[in-house]
Amino acid sequence: MINYKNVEVLLNADASGRYQQEWQNYIRSRREVYRNLVNEHLDSNMVSEANWILRSHYSSGEEMGLNIVPGDICYTDFGQAYLNETGYQHFGIVMAVCRRKAMVIPMTSNPVQYAKAYDPQENPAGRKHLMRLGKIEPMNRPSVLFLNDMKFINTARVIDVKAHLDVRSVLFRRIQQRMLEVLFSREGWLDMPTGRPAAGEPGEN
């Protein structure tokens, strides 16, 4: 897997042949970008860029020996992100695979997000776009899903498969149900007939 030191070598390397000048110009421009990045995003951004350079030409993870199936919990590079989006390197659970693309829900073990997540028994007033998974073996800590960040991705973004949740399990079926609620519910917090927040009410992640 690409790490920070690998990326440093890549970004400081000299290219050879007829692309040498283009490579130097590219690296010079990227250094300017990195100087202006927030420090907490610097390493993650460099890793994502290196992964893009090495992986973006693959049509799927199968070309790298990764056969992704529903229920897989994967360490994935989601790439650069806007505010209120999941980006860079995170775990995610695969809910479906369609024509070499996977529907993935990003997840985190962040205890703050876990505490905020809706739970019908323990936190009925919690945020419904967050779903508690508990601890899935062999993961180290309890996890929570960002249901409003579900997306189809090229499976070449998957770095590694770390765990698997049986698609016949009660928990997997519960995730499917919560996906439908987030996508199509007309109740309360999702009751937006126009599909847009009211004026002066920005969306919330």
Image: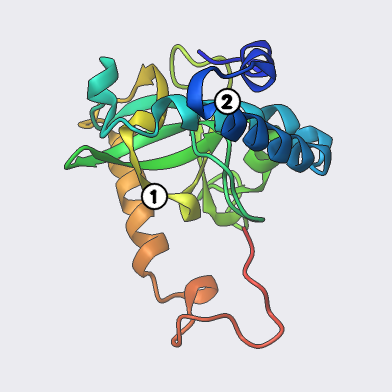
Q: Is residue 177 left or right of residue 149?
A: left
Asked if residue 113 is positioned above or below residue 90 in the image, the reply reads below
Closer-to-camera residue (31/151)? 31
Image location of residue 103, percent across then percent down: 32, 44
Q: Residue furthest left?
A: 99
Image location of residue 39, percent across then percent down: 82, 34
Q: Residue at x 48, y 40 (%)?
A: 106
Q: Circle 2: is it few (<14), some (14-19), or many (20+) Cα within 10 Å? A: few
Q: Closer to the camera: disc 2 or disc 1?
A: 2
Q: What amino acid does circle 2 point to?
A: Gln
Q: Secondary structure at mark 2?
A: helix
Split into 4 quadrants, where in the image is the C terminus? bottom right
**Residue on which disc 1 sits:** 151
Q: Is residue 101 left or right of residue 198?
A: left
Q: Secondary structure at mark 1?
A: strand
Q: Residue at x 38, y 70 (%)?
A: 185
Q: In the drawing, what numbered circle is on residue 50?
A: none
Q: In the drawing, what numbered circle is on residue 20?
A: 2
Image location of residue 181, percent across then percent down: 38, 61
- Tag 2–tag 1 contact (CB < 8 Å): no
Q: What amino acid does circle 1 point to?
A: Lys
Asked if residue 194 is positioned above or below residue 1 in the image, the reply reads below
- Disc with the residue nearer the chain's start (2 vs 1): 2
Q: Residue at x 45, y 33 (%)?
A: 92
Q: Residue at x 79, y 34 (%)?
A: 40
- Disc 2 and disc 1: Cα gap in Å? 37 Å
Q: Circle 1: is it few (<14), some (14-19), or many (20+) Cα within 10 Å? A: some
